[in-house]
Each structure stands twice: as C-alpha cells, then as structure tokens.
Amino acid sequence: MHRKINATLVGAVAATALLGSAAMAENWRGWNIHVEGYPNTVAMDKFAELLEEKTDGGITLQMFHGGTLGSQPDAIEQVRLGGLEIGNFNLGPIGPIAPEANVVSLPFIFKDPAHMFRVMNGEGGEKIAAGMEAKGLVPLAWYDSGARSFYNGAKPINSPEDVAGMKVRVMNNDLYSGMISQLGGNPSPMAFAEVYQSLKTGVVDGAENNWPSYESTGHFEVAGYYSLSEHLIIPECVCINADVYNGLDEAQQTALKEAAMESAELQRELWAEREAKSREMVEAAGVVTNEIANKLPFQEAMVPVYETYLEANPDLRPLVELIQSTE
C-alpha cells in the first residue's frame, strides 16, 4: 500500500514538473521581409532551430517570412512594443527612431563591407546597440546586406555630373534624399514594390540597391546599367524586444546570442554566394557593369550632407569620427 502511495506521489510530482516546464516555455514570433530561399530567410530559420536547441525547448520561435505580418516600419514598431518578439531589420528604417543607428546611413561612412563589420563588431557597434536598446530594440547579431550602388537605363554613372538631373528612387530617409540632391539629382522616395513599374514607365530614371535585390526584383530588365558607387553599406540586425530580452535569465540570454551569432555566420556565407550569383546572372543577361575609377568627387559632394546632419545631431559627432577612424 505504501509503495502504491509513493509511486502515485512520485508520478504526481513528475507531472507537475512537466506542466510547470510547459507553462514556462516561451513561444515567440519573428518577422522577416525576405522570400523563401533568400540568405536572410535561411539564416533566420536556422536561428529559430538553434534557439530551440540551445534552450532545450524552453524558447521556440515561429518565423513569418515575406513581410506577411506587415511592412518593415510596422514590424519594427511591433517588436518595439512587444507585439512581436524578434525581427530581422535593415538599420535604414531604424535610423529615424534611434539616432545612433542613423549614422550608418551616412553616404560613404564605410570604406567597404569588411570595414562595416569591423565597426559593428567593435566599440562603434556597441554605441549603436545602446542607442537602439533605449528605443526598445536589442540587436543580437549583424547581418550583411552588401553595398548599394546606382542603376539606370540610360548610361553608366562615373561622376556626380552623370547623376545631375536624374530622378532617382531612394528609401524614405532624409539622408538618402540629401545624397541625391547633393549629386544634382532629384530624389524620389517611394515604396520598393513600386520601383520596377516606375523604372519601366520613366516615373524615375534610376534607383540604387545591392546585387541580389537588383536581380531578384527584375530591375535589371528595365535599368541595364549598374555603376559600382557602393555609396551605402547598411547592416541588418537580428533584434529582440528589450523587455523580453531583459526578462530572460543569464543562461537564456547567452543561448539567444549564441544562436543569433551562429545564424549571422551562415547568413554572411550565403550572402557572398548569392551576391556573386546575382551579378553573374544579370551580366549574362546583358547588364553593363562599370567600376567607378575615382569615388572621391562623390565623397566630396557629401560634405554638406554630413555638416547638416552633425549640426542637427552634435552629440553624434564622436560616433561618426569613431567610425571614420576605425581601421
């Protein structure tokens, strides 16, 4: 009789423990704008897999790809407010929210993608991360999004004079509009989904983006000149809601960061492969690619953009100088 009672008690305790474990499990949702097969999509799925593995099932993450839960600005707000726990975002649209993050949108602030990662993995990245956390977003890892360059359907761009008079689509950020204006062009902020038709019908003369975006959207079909200005090198982040992150214990935070960093390593490998493949594909289709022999005139034209920015944000001058001085 005593043995039966003890067995029953042991079973009850075990069941209670299991129920308690299930109740404590975290079930998160994550946002990503990219389509299936894109480097970021593959990497974010890997992040979800690693997160569940490293927390022994304590945290699960369901990813929603292709922007199915809303636009990027909407998703950023959802993560900030806790409607979503995780997001993979470009720092461009985070810039207007967190001033420190906007620094990476200054044209030619980075020498090349390798320089960008040296900055983001060092003191500069720590300062940017602190500014983002103050606005409710904790970056866990930095993803690659390549370098953005100009493309159009009329001629190669080799100097600022070649941009003069052109209507160029840009993302909705005053820094990008200022960049085109200083080159003598007419900035045309518009949604990314509208760019193909706008290029085709002449609403805009050109746009700017990285190789995979230029290829995957078919923009190369209506804008056959790609000029390697590499004027913007904007990282992407794997971000988590600040309150959610700060509510985790130390072991969970460590597991979360490890999973994010491992996914970032995968994303960068896949990005390099996709970038090379996209360039090969569009050039095989007849796109004319030109290296810009001297970028100094473009960089010199950006001086007023920097001056205007730093006059409005004097407290960010040390961060700009830190980035520029990072070897």
Image: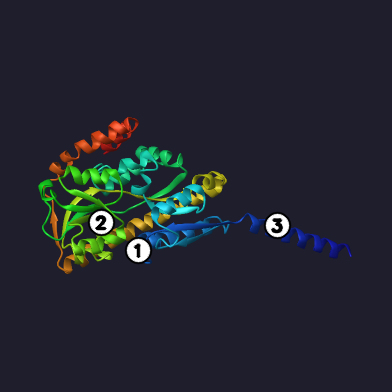
Amino acid of disc 1: Tyr
Disc 2 is placed on an element classified as loop
Q: Is residue 244 above or below residue 21?
A: above
Residue visible at 31% across and 40% down? Answer: 103
Amino acid of disc 3: Ala
Amino acid of disc 2: Asn
Measuring from the top left, give residue 57's x and y in whole percent.
Answer: 57, 59
Residue visible at 19% across and 65% down? Answer: 222
Question: What separation in Å lies between label 1 and label 2 (alpha carbons)?
Answer: 13 Å
Q: Is residue 21 above or below residue 281?
A: above
Mark nearer the N terminus (1 vs 3): 3
According to the image, label 2 marks what residue? 210
Residue visible at 48% across and 59% down? Answer: 48
According to the image, label 1 marks what residue? 38
Res 280 label:
none
Q: Is residue 215 above or below residue 293?
A: below
- Taking the view exactly as shown, the residue that stands out farthest to the right is 1
Measuring from the top left, give residue 237's x and y in whole percent.
Answer: 39, 50
Specify few, some or many for label 1: CA neighbours under 10 Å numbering under 14, 14-19, or 20 or more: some
According to the image, label 3 marks what residue? 17
Question: What separation in Å lies between label 2 and label 3 (alpha carbons)?
Answer: 51 Å
Q: Nearer the viewer, residue 279 or 314?
A: 314
Left or right, 184 with respect to 124, comes to left
Q: Marks 2 and 3: which is nearer the front? A: 2
Visible residue check, residue 270: yes
Picture mark count: 3
Q: Quadrant of residue 18?
A: bottom right
Visible residue check, residue 49: no
Question: What separation in Å lies between label 1 and label 3 (alpha carbons)?
Answer: 41 Å
Instruction: Point out the image quarter for the N terminus.
Output: bottom right
Mark nearer the N terminus (2 vs 3): 3
